[in-house]
Amino acid sequence: MSTVMKIENIEANIGDKKILKGLNLELEPGKVHAIMGPNGAGKSTLSKTIVGHYDVEVTGGDITYKGKSIVDMEPEERALEGIFLSFQHPVEIPGVNNAYFLRTALNAKRKHEGKEELNAAEFLREMKKHLEMLGMKSDMISRNLNEGFSGGEKKRNEILQMLILEPEVIILDEIDSGLDIDALRQVSEGINKMKDGKRTFLVITHYSRILDYIEPDYIHVLKEGKVIKTAGPELVPYLEEHGYDGIKED
Amino acid sequence: MNLITLKNKNAQEVATLLDIKERNAIVKKFSTLGLPHKMTEEYHYFDVEKLLDVDYKTLNYVPKSIEEGDQIEIVDGVVTTAPKGLRVYPEICENIDMEHFDSLYYLGHLLSPRVIKIDVDGDAHVEILHKYTQSHALIHYRIEITNQANRHVTIYENFETDEITNTLVLYGYDMHIAKDSTLRMVRLQTMSHKRYSMIASHRVEVAKNAGVVLKNFDFGGDQALQLLKVDLEEYAHADAGHLLYLNEDSKRGTASQIIHKGEYSSSKQIAKNILDGQARGIFDALIRVKDSAKYTKAEQDSKTILLHEKAYMASKPQLEIYIDELEASHGSTTGQLDEKQIFYLQSRGISHIEARKILVIAFANTLIETIKDTRHQERIKNAFEEVFYASHKG
């Protein structure tokens, strides 16, 4: 199997607590990998570790992305290289206009890729098609970043960023939490639009509902800081019925 | 003139030193309060004695014939231009607050008995430009503004200087805001280091059912203190806010008293402070609710971001309440930029340095965006970004 990202025996702490305890995972390019597991298994810590969150201290192991170690990279370098995290709880930033933020982020990426920066008019044209598809009102981009957004609006805004930045590895951390059925359908549509056989998805979820909309290729069960089982999508109904306790380590 | 010579002098000595033959009540008031010093509460965090103890050049204040212009232009304390139809003239000020907390309010009236009187008729937008051209000078003047009942006035106040150094400006407003009217004043001060220091002592009298909005955007160097006293009659409202951005060793801020005198009066005072280098920000603000001011609503809040470990914020929000029937709150927070917000921006490919800049500008924008006129809002945004980026290159 070719891999775009390889997580080898990674160990990570948050504060004094060891959360990831020698976790191994390989992501295949163009595939949807779902990470499932009980609360406290380390799912969110895994996503934070991949993107270089300041809470996480990596104490062992390595993460390579396209053959290059990323554990010592700054978060913005990882983002510019094509790693994207859709946050479970996106922060509100009063005073930062959403359109300004999106254009700054896009232009940072374009600059990194040696492309010309987009001006405001070009950017808005680019934006309009995504807004329509996500069922977002155009005034959302003139509001302050996530300020006063409902849970659903915040998640749509995360997907909007994903569509604009066109990352290669996309981590969706509990993307379905707080979404009603209509919002879930629109968000999933945005995600599925990005499935082009080249981009890789890591869908972190506690519930299987999201997997009805985003069809996974692999299911990885995470427990006590380790991946204990990897299987195909046929594992989902088993987990629905038996929960995580019945899963035996591979 | 060296103002420190007025220290610890009785009324008669003050009158002799300033060569004043009348205005005994004001002289007495000044000598009773005394020249401010380090232990004077409102000046405690401001090196006032250093500023006063300097031999300044004194200027002659001869009124000039006023030319017609788009704005009121005041050069070294003398009006040179004014818009057509606006009554701007020198006059002895008779309506002086005899309960002001600041002795320099009285000194200002003693040094400048003839104030610049501005009568605003009807609804109006007025721009005032203060220009300073003299180095090592004491520039003192006062302005009195009146408006009409049930009218709405907006004033934009700006400052410019020539290549001057070590000048002290003592100025201030007496504003009389008529019943059922509103007056908004938006003040933008942005200047190079060591040009001039300023002590601005204001008095604002807000009549029944009237409102005043005072927004001060201070991106200055050197030293400046705004001393503000606002009196609110029944159903009157005051919205006073300042945004400070300070760097190097500047010391600037606001010392204020908002006095609720009438029932159902309301006030909101928001201070946002961004401090860099070894700067010191000051927010020493008292809201007093008198026993006559039942059903008052008062809100006071100061938020500070420290960008350098040596920067310091002296924040002292205070409530003094003499009744039970009211809604009042006050608070003060001082801290660094939010790590979660920085990380969120970084996770989208924005560098740590750029993320910090964006967040500082965002913090400032929350107050700048309360200015609804887009032209002036843009002007203030640009002024802030220019000053901020100049000290955060790279």
Image: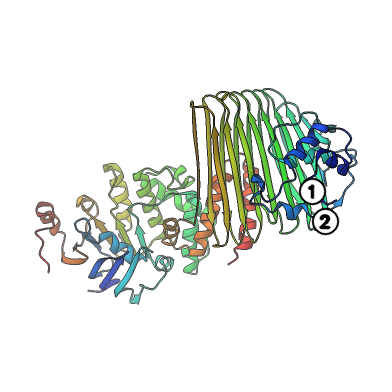
Residue found 39% across the figure and 61% down from its top: A166
Kind of residue at disc 1:
Lys
Label disc, if present, on residue B136 of the rendered structure: 2
Query: Of residues A15 and B340, which is closer to you in this image?
Result: A15
Is disc 2 surrounded by few (<14), some (14 to 19) or many (20+) residues within 10 Å?
A: some
Q: What element carries label 1?
A: strand
Looking at the image, can residue A126 be seen? yes
- Front residue of A172/A222: it is A222
Q: Work out whether residue A156 or residue A17 is closer to the camera in this orientation and state it.
A: A17
| Quarter of image, res A194 | bottom left
**In the image, residue B106 lies at what x, y percent?**
76, 38
Number of other residues with Cα within 10 Å of mark 1, as a class: few under 14, some 14 to 19, many 20 or more: some
Whether residue A111 is situated above or below residue B327 in the rendered picture: below
Q: In this view, does B167 lie to the left or right of A29?
A: right
Image height check: is B76 above or below A173? above
Q: In this view, does B187 lie to the left or right of A63?
A: right
User: In the image, what residue occupies the spot 64% across and 38% down?
Assistant: B214
Quarter-of-image position of residue B204: top right
